[in-house]
Amino acid sequence: MFSRILVANRGEIALRIIRSCKELGVETVAVCSKADENALYLQYADAHICIGPGEAEESYLNIPSIVSAAEIADIEAIHPGYGFLAEDSHFAEVCESSNIVFIGPSSEVMTKMGDKIQARRLAAENKIPVIPGSDSTVENQQQALKIAHEVGYPVLIKASFGGGGRGMRVAHNDISLVNSLAVAQREAEAAFKDSSIYIEKYIEHSRHIEVQIVADNYGNVIHLGERDCTIQRRHQKLLEQAPSPTVSDQLREDICKAALKIAKAVNYTNVGTVEFLVDEEGKHYFIEMNTRLQVEHPVTEMITGMDLVKEQIRIAHGERLNLRQKKVKSEGVAIECRINAEDPNNSFRPYAGKITMCSVPGGRGVRVDSHIYTGYEVPPYYDSLLSKLIVHQKSREDAIACMRRALNEYRIEGVKTTIPLHLKIIMDPRFITGDVHTDFVENFIDEKEQ
């Protein structure tokens, strides 16, 4: 096993990685910006190195600073977590050329799957349904209008190298398409340093279903079932469930087979997620592959009993998967609520500031992945995620009841959070029956305001 790993991230995921490393007997070196010098995760790492000021571009996205920290700390591997450089193929390539193990897939695979147009082509070549749309990047308005007229409105403009809902715009007619095109390109350039976009049919009233896959370096690939990530705002996930309350046995079999087929087609290694949209008729469409650990990985861990971070580290170290598909067991239902420092009643405006009180829920079947504490200063530079509240129970009815109780116990004061919104969502009859779609949250908030 590795003796020392650099954790190239911050917040709850940094702490999550550090804890798994401790259980494996691996030392950890954490990096931090000056804005995170009082962060909780630093207290659990064996050592830490400051890599720059608060701005992400000058710290957590600064590849030379992170590689320098790795060389100073004499580490063997880097775990990128999620976000920041986790899906940056150039970062993975730099690690490889520096003889540092990147805990994730190869830079070649990341490049291939990071280009969403190339990923769509790969899916289509393997006879996996993709959403109708452009086969290459859209270069101008005329081309965009031509594609929109061919597939029919509404259409979705997407960044070719995007993620997290950035660089995405829905257009319902020619005027909105022309106006949204430039906005999406600017967002893509700012977020991903690449303005290329493509267009696909916007599937209204869809559900977002993803499959967790795990693959070693010896051709062994398994899936751990699906997660339902339909509850979103601005194409960003808010609440996740495993298994999905609406996926039939046949659909589950179809999408899991498709996920394995894609992973094998690119010789994928380590942990990854294959994402699909499911329309009102139950048809599934491949949308993308995330070549990293997902924020919502805990719900899969809860129902399978696996530690995905440990699996990542073991695979990166060259170990074989000790689990075969027939041995994968799924028990019970898990739900995760992302607790963000945002005001849902004000267009999800992010909040920075001091947390004046923090009291975390507990009890049987309750897990909290978090980095906050009373007195913690939420910095303005990063994603607004404060914690992930996860529950695991025998049935979905029990899981919903447990989540309701846990949310009512959770106290965070000093900044606005999404806790009140989550309480309203899980008590809504449509959520309870599973009758929700990706536009549910926006419509839900509009209903509450009327």
Image: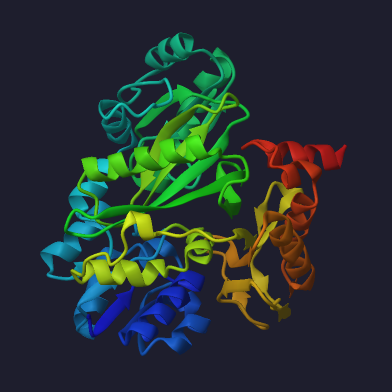
Residue reaching furthest front?
326
Q: Position of residue 164 (x, y in %)?
A: 48, 47
Residue at 59 percent of width and 53 percent of height: 241
Image: 144 above or below 278:
above
Residue at 24 percent of width and 77 percent of height: 70
Asked whether, in this view, residue 144 is left or right of residue 413, the answer is: left
Q: Quadrant of residue 47?
A: bottom left
Q: Position of residue 334 (x, y in %)?
A: 60, 60
Asked whether, in this view, residue 317 is left or right of residue 12, the answer is: left
Q: For the image shown, how many numbered marks are present on the structure? A: 0
Residue 102 visible here: no
Looking at the rendered image, the quarter that the N terminus falls into is bottom left
Image: 240 above or below 58:
above
Asked whether, in this view, residue 445 is left or right of residue 385, the answer is: right
Residue 373 visible here: yes
The foreground one among 57 and 298 is 298
Looking at the rendered image, the quarter that the C terminus falls into is top right
Q: Quadrant of residue 76?
A: bottom left
The foreground one among 389 and 166 is 389
The foreground one among 186 and 269 is 269
Image: 314 above or below 173:
below
Residue at 29 percent of width and 40 percent of height: 262
Asked whether, in this view, residue 283 is left or right of residue 412, the answer is: left
Q: Position of residue 195 (x, y in %)?
A: 36, 36
Q: Position of residue 187 (x, y in %)?
A: 46, 40
Q: Quadrant of residue 332?
A: bottom right
